[in-house]
Image (cartoon, rainbow, N blue to C red):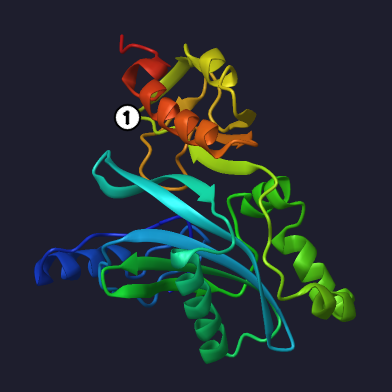
Amino acid sequence: MRSAASDGVAWCQSPDDAIAAFRRLNGRENVLSDPNDKVVAQECLVGTEYTVDTVSCDGVHQVCDIWETYRINANGIPDLLVAWRLLPATGEVQDQLVAYAFGVLDALGIRYGAAHAEIKMTADGPFLVEVGARIAGATLPEGARLATGRSQVDWTVDAYVRPERFRRKSGRSYRLRQHVARTVMVAPRSGTLIAYPSLEAIKGLDSFYDMRVRVSPGQYLPLTVDDLTYPIFITLLHEVGEVVTRDLWTLRYIDGVDFYQLETAK
């Protein structure tokens, strides 16, 4: 009921799978150090997942950023999240997402402050995965500010401190000054890390902007199975969207067993 970072998520193909998942989770301490006293069962939705980040002031909703997510089947996880890419504010898909997200905010009575909605676009249209009355994580606001000059944090400050300014600026679609994507590396095995042999190749990409290494040489490298076990976060930024797209797929080519030099067992 209250967790984060894909902690405890299980894909259940049968009633027995669901019972086993419940027993594994019930009473266990989650990633937020709270005991699980309830477990959520959700339909497995098939489709691309998007995040819609908003800020509201007295019931007026403003879209701050819309991200498309990219996922792969790896390490036993059928839809491991590997990248977020900021989309233009308007378009056929975006317009559906925004209308749906605003309806969710109204239904839940979210009239003030930030909200982070995760929505699957299925063959039957948009379906809600979850929504939190909070600012987005994964440094998405930072990425939005790089691309548009303004972020969900800026809008939240205006909503609470300068509501007149919020009302004056709300209703306008954000504009992409640059294209931005956030992506991660996926460790295919675990062990003591010696080095990342191809790290300089990543820094040489045309759209490379920033890298945050969470597992350094000498430390234990866990198998990547959720948001807590990514070894490296990378930000790509470029005025040409195709360059960002090319570099995203190049990173997936660079990633793999040979990207990680591990200490061999003695």
Residue displayed at 41% across by 31% down: 249
Q: Is residue 202 placed above or below 25 in the rendered structure?
A: above
Front residue of this view, candidates 212 and 112: 112
Decide: is 34 above or below 88. below
Q: Can the viewer see residue 86? A: yes
Residue receiving disc 1: 188
Q: Where is residue 24 in the image (x, y as percent from the top left)?
A: 27, 62
Q: Determine the residue located farthest toward the top in the rendered image.
A: 266
How many labels, in total? 1
Who is closer to the viewer here, 263 or 214? Answer: 214
Quadrant in the picture for residue 266: top left
Q: In which quarter of the image is the N terminus?
A: bottom left
Residue drawn at the location 35% of the way across and 43% of the way down: 225
The answer to whether 44 appears left or right of 231 in the picture is: left
Image position of 64 with respect to 215: above or below = below
Query: Toward the viewer: 67 or 80?
Result: 67
Q: Position of residue 209 (x, y in %)?
A: 65, 30
Q: On the picture, is 150 further left or further right than 211? A: right
Tag 1: amino acid: Pro
Residue 15 in which image quadrant: bottom left
Answer above or below: position of 77 versus 26. Answer: above
Q: In this view, does 117 lie to the left or right of 121?
A: right
Residue 74 as seen in the image, left or right of residue 66: left
Q: Position of residue 9 (x, y in %)?
A: 33, 60
The image quarter in which residue 122 lies:
bottom left
**Residue 201 locus on image (x, y percent):** 52, 15
- Density class for disc 1 (Cα within 10 Å; few <14, some 14-19, many ≥20) is some
Q: Is residue 40 visible?
A: no
Helix, strand or loop at mark 1: loop
